[in-house]
């Protein structure tokens, strides 16, 4: 369970980092940045689902 929690923390940290980077500019983030944020959200949900099963 500790490894899942650590992975979850890393994923959330990376997603937050990308969001904060995108917020630095007054324009829309690049599609690739939005895609990476969304993919991280899916990964976070998957890890949380596995953790709930454990």
Image (tube, rainbow, N blue to C red):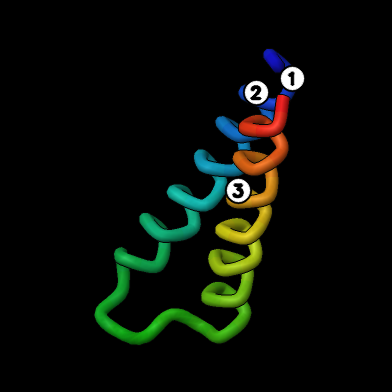
Who's the residue at 65% across and 65% down the image?
39
Residue that badge 2 annotates: 6
* Picture quarter with the N terminus: top right
x, y percent for residue 53: 70, 32
Q: Is residue 24 left or right of residue 38?
A: left
What residue would you read off at disc 1? 3
Query: Which mark is on residue 44?
Result: 3
Residue 54 placed where, x, y %? 72, 24
In the image, taking residue 29 as reference, residue 35 lies left or right, namely: right
Task: Identify the element where label 2 is drawn.
Answer: helix
**Residue drawn at 44 percent across, 49 percent down:** 16
At 60% from the left edge and 40% from the top edge, which residue is drawn?
Answer: 48
Distance from the alpha carbon under mark 1 to that under mark 3: 14 Å
Q: Quadrant of residue 28?
A: bottom left
- Furthest residue to the left? 26
Q: Label 3 crowding class (10 Å Cα cut-off): few <14, some 14-19, many 20+?
A: some
Instruction: Verify CB contact (< 8 Å) between mark 1 and mark 2.
Output: yes
All told, the count of numbered labels is 3
Q: Secondary structure at mark 1?
A: helix
Which is more toward the observer, 27 or 35?
Answer: 35
Which percent across, then down, holds residue 51? 66, 31
């Amino acid at each position: 369970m500790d490894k899942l929690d650590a992975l979850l923390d890393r994923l959330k940290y990376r997603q937050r980092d990308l969001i904060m980077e995108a917020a630095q500019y007054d324009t829309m983030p690049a599609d690739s940045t939005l895609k990476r944020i969304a993919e991280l959200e899916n990964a976070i949900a998957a890890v949380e689902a596995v953790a709930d099963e454990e």
